[in-house]
């Protein structure tokens, strides 16, 4: 079963553009499919979508990868004082992660991804109909 994960990076468009490039590079270490970039702050003509800057869509194929991804994202945000992301899993919920998150928040982030893993483990197998 594949889980779709949306990661939204928040901040000034130029900074977000740089952070998105960095995060996309680091996400290549995971067993995930990364959707192509839709827009960039460097785009200057028609078709520039500021809402798309900082939006990363992933397809995650296994629950352990999803949990590892959650740990990685928490640590990635903690590397700089002004980082903030919103992780969304359609139909299941969302979690905002900031560098200001303390120990209690880290536990909540772990629980969020653990619940997503449990949801995948309990999902019915797809039928061939």
Image (cartoon, rainbow, N blue to C red):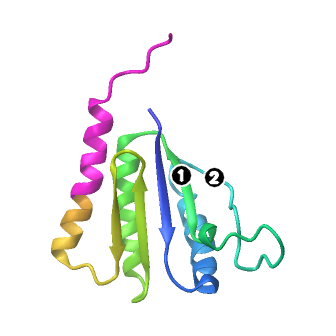
Say left or right for 31 vs 92.
right
Closer to the camera in the image, 14 or 103:
14
| Res 118 → quadrant | top left
The label shown at residue 58 is: 1
Is 112 included in the stretch rendered in magenta? yes
Q: Position of residue 35 (x, y in %)?
A: 63, 52
Highlighted range, magenta? 111-129
Give the residue displayed 46% in from the left and 52% down from the top.
5
| Res 72 → quadrant | bottom left
Q: CA distance from mark 2 to mark 1?
A: 6 Å
| Res 105 → quadrant | bottom left
Residue 74 drawn above or below residue 92: below
Q: How many residues crowd mark 2 within 10 Å: few (<14), some (14–19), many (20+)?
A: few
Say left or right for 126 vs 95.
right
Q: Secondary structure at mark 2?
A: loop
Q: Secondary structure at mark 1?
A: strand
The label shown at residue 50 is: none
Q: Earlier in the sequence, mark 2 or mark 1?
A: 2
Q: Position of residue 103 (x, y in %)?
A: 17, 75
Q: Would you say the residues marked 2 and 1 are in contact, meaning their CB atoms lie under 8 Å apart? A: yes
Magenta span: chief secondary structure: helix
Q: Position of residue 120 (x, y in %)?
A: 33, 36
Residue 22 drawn above or below residue 94: below
Task: Spot the residue most to the bottom.
Answer: 81
Give the residue displayed 41% in from the left and 39% down from the top.
62
Say left or right for 52 vs 110.
right
Q: Which residue is mark 2?
A: 35
Task: Spot the residue most to the front.
Answer: 46
């Amino acid at each position: 079963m594949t889980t779709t994960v949306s990661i939204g990076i928040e901040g000034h468009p130029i900074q977000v553009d740089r952070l998105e490039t960095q995060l996309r590079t680091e996400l290549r270490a995971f067993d995930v499919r990364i959707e192509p970039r839709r827009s960039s702050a460097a785009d200057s003509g028609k078709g520039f979508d500021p809402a798309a800057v900082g939006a990363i869509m992933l397809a995650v194929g296994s629950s352990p990868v999803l949990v590892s991804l959650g740990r990685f994202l928490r640590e990635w945000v903690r590397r700089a004082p002004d980082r903030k992301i919103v992780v969304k899993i359609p139909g299941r919920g969302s979690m905002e992660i900031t560098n200001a998150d303390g120990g209690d928040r880290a536990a909540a982030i772990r629980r969020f991804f653990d619940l997503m893993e449990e949801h995948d483990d309990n999902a019915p197998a797809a039928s061939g109909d």
